[in-house]
Amino acid sequence: MRDLEVRLGRILSVGTWVGVAALGVGVILMMASGVSPLEPAFPSLDPGAILPGILGLEASAWLWVGLIVVIATPILRVVAALLGFASRGERDMVAVSAAILLVVAIGVLIGRGSA
Amino acid sequence: MAIALIMVAGGAAAGLFGSLLGLGGGILIVPLLTLGFDIPLREAVGVSLVCVIMTSSASAGVYLERHVANLRLGMTLELFTAAGALIGGLVAFSLDERWVAALFALLLVYTGVSMLRRGKPAPPLPSRADGADDGPSTFTERLSGPDYRVHRLGIGAFGSVGAGVVSALLGIGGGVVKVPLMHLGLGVPLRVATATSNLMIGITAAAGAIIYLARGGIDPYVAGPTAVGVFIGASVGSRIAHRIDLRVLRVLFVVVLAYTAFQLFRRALGL
C-alpha cells in the first residue's frame, strides 16, 4: 500500500511540474507576442491545432497543453490507483476508482453534448 | 505584457496567502479576477478551478509520499464530491451570475467567521462508540486508520456531494467543508483530514473544470498567468509558513474577506 501511495504521489508531483512548465512557456510566449489577458475574445480549444501550435511556438497551444495536463493529472492518479488496487485484489476499491472515472466521463459527455 | 505580469503577481499573492492560511487559494482567486481584473464571474470560477487542481496536486503528492493522507477514505468520498461537482458545474451555467456572486459572498463570510473562531479549542471528537450504528462493516474498517475508526460514512457521502457542488459552482477546493466534515463528522484526526481533503480536491475540481472547459468557459490567456502565479506563491508560502506570525495575517485576511464579501454583495444586488 505504501508503494502505491508513493507512486500516486509521484504522478501528482510530476504532472504538476509538467503542466506548470508548459503554462510557463505559454505565458512567456504570450508576453513576447503582446497578447493581453483582458481581451474578451480568446482561442477555443481545438485539439487538431495543438501540435502545429506547439511546434510553431504559439502561446495558446502551450497554454492549452498546460491546462489539459493540470486537469488530467488527478484523473491519471485515479487510473493508476485503479490498477494498483486491482493488482492488490481490492475489488471494492477498484469499483470505487472505476465509478469515479465513470463520473468524470459523464462530465465530458455532458459538457460536450451541450457545448 | 504588463497586464499578464500583474496577473502573475496577483496569482502569486493569492497562492501565498492561501498556503500560509491553509486555504487552497481558490477563495482569493475568484475575487481577484472579478473585482481586480473585471473578468466575468463564471470565467473566473473556471480559471480558479484549474489553479485549485494544481495546488491540490502539488501538496497531495507530498502528503501521499509521506503517507499522511488516507487514500481509501479519500477515494471513496471523492466519488461523491466528483458527482457533486458535475451537478455544480451544470447549475453554474444555468444560474444568473448575481446568484453566484451572492453565494460567494456568503462563503467568504462563513470562511471569515470560521477563521476567527480557529485558535479556540475544537469541539471534542465523538467517541468511538458512536460508530456502533455502522455495524461491523469490513469496508468501513478498511477505510479507518491505524489509530482511528471512521464512522458515519453516510454523512460523509452526503456532505461530500454538497462540497462538490460548492466547489464547481464557486471555483474553490471545498476544504472549508470537507475538513470539518471528516474531522468532526467522521472522527478522522485533523492532520489526516486536511491531507485527505487536499487529495480529494484534485479530482473534484477536475470534474468541475471539465464542464467549464467543454463549454468554452476557460480563457487560457487568463488561466495561464494566474495559474503560474498561484504555483509560485503557494510554493513560497509552504516554505516560509513556519516563520510567519499567523495571528496578524489572519486578522488582515478577515478584513480582506469582509471587504470582498461587501463588494460581491453589491454586485449581487446590481448596485
Image: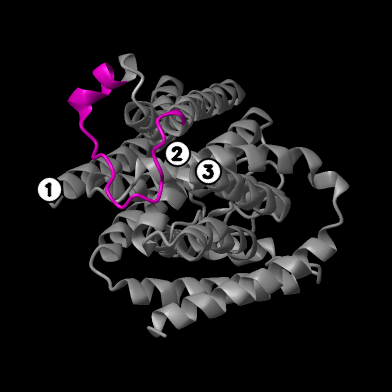
Q: Secondary structure at mark 2?
A: helix
At x 61%, y 63%, the residue is B180
Quadrant of image for the C terminus of chain B: bottom left
Q: Which residue is mark 3?
A: B2
Give the chain letter at badge 1: A
Q: Secondary structure at mark 3?
A: helix
Q: Are marks 3 and 2 on the same chain?
A: yes
Q: Amino acid at mark 2?
A: Gly
- Which range of residues does the magenta coloring cover? A32-53
B22 and B262: which one is in front?
B262
Residue A103 percent coordinates (x, y): 28, 45
Q: Which residue is mark 1?
A: A113
3 vs 2, front mark: 3
The correct choice, above or below, for B140 with respect to B156 in the image is above
Dominant secondary structure of the magenta stretch? loop
Q: Are marks 3 and 1 in contact (CB under 8 Å)?
A: no
Residue B213 percent coordinates (x, y): 29, 45
Looking at the image, is mark 3 or mark 2 earlier in the sequence?
A: 3
Q: Are marks 2 and 1 in contact (CB under 8 Å)?
A: no
At x 61%, y 52%, the residue is B14
Give the chain letter at badge 2: B
Q: Quadrant of residue B176?
A: bottom right
The correct choice, above or below, for B82 with respect to B228 in the image is below
Q: Are marks 3 and 1 on the same chain?
A: no
The correct choice, above or below, for A44 with respect to B25 in the image is above
At x 62%, y 48%, the residue is B15
At x 35%, y 76%, the residue is B98
Q: Secondary structure at mark 1?
A: helix
Q: Amino acid at mark 3?
A: Ala
Residue at the extreme left? A113
Q: Quadrant of residue A46?
A: top left
Q: Are marks 2 and 1 on the same chain?
A: no
